[in-house]
Image (cartoon, rainbow, N blue to C red):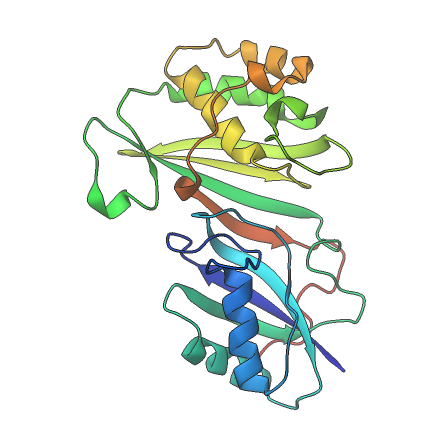
Amino acid sequence: MRHIRLVVEYDGTNLCGWQRQDNAPTVQQHLEEALAKLLTHEVAVVGASRTDSGVHARGQVACFRTERPIALHGIRRGLNTLLPDSIAIRDAAEVAEDFHPRFSATGKHYRYSILARPDRSPPWRDRAWHHPDALSIPNMVEGSHALLGEHDFSAFRAAGCGAKTTVRRIESVAVTRAHELVEIDVRGNAFLRNMVRIIVGTLVEVGTGKRAPSQVAEIVASKDRLQAGITAPAHGLTLVEVRYDGHPRFGPKSM
């Protein structure tokens, strides 16, 4: 039995997230249906991250098993022919039997994009959160320092989060601005439901002066969701990369 790892890129605008649902289009559903056509047998696809409706990805990782002897480049090209325009396969490789997209992961990188200007922009409407108020990048950077390291992030998780523990480790938070675009890059070992979007909502409130940078540490210590900022809209979020440090991440290169 072959164990195949895919790196998947998608525009989540018209998708209802990663996980298969009964009456809505999802990334997992499209992948499983395309693979069933390509391989002529039913396929179960496992993903690294259950991205929400509207969230995008450049480096989602997914795995499936098959006995079909189709070359890796044939799998990649075949899927890119069968999948909708909003989903594409960047790479396909065989991996070890014990590799798991979610449980083998050692870290994830998310990027949140904010269009910081008075007027909206149609080209960015599904890719960035339009925020018309001025943002202080130095204040946002200062506030982000309190997020670094290992903490109980209960204040930054959505209702209904089923995680067994709320302790996570944030490795870095970078807040940068290039003209009208502000990007917040968050890297950590794992994330709670809506955690990055709540972090962004909180830092934006710091950037507008609604909160002082020092309040971020108080919010973390409170472990109270009501103390944190709003949940930033889903469409500004992109899963950039899933890391597998120390694991044969990609296996043989695709051909």
Percent position (x, y) of residue 198?
52, 28
Rendered position, 219 above or below 67 = above
Percent position (x, y) of residue 94?
68, 76
Percent position (x, y) of residue 241?
56, 52
Q: Quadrant of the C terminus?
A: bottom right
- Drawn side of residue 36 relative to residue 129, left or right: right
- Residue 39 appears in the figure: yes
- Drawn side of residue 234 relative to residue 171, left or right: left
Rendered position, 149 above or below 125 = above
Residue nearest the viewer, comparing 79 with 37: 37
Percent position (x, y) of residue 76?
51, 78
Residue occupying the point 51% across, 61% down: 27
Residue sticking out furthest to the front: 23
Rendered position, 204 above or below 96 = above
Q: How many marks?
A: 0
Residue nearest the viewer, comparing 52 with 180: 52
Residue sticking out furthest to the left: 119
Residue nearest the viewer, comparing 164 with 160: 160
- Residue 255 appears in the figure: no
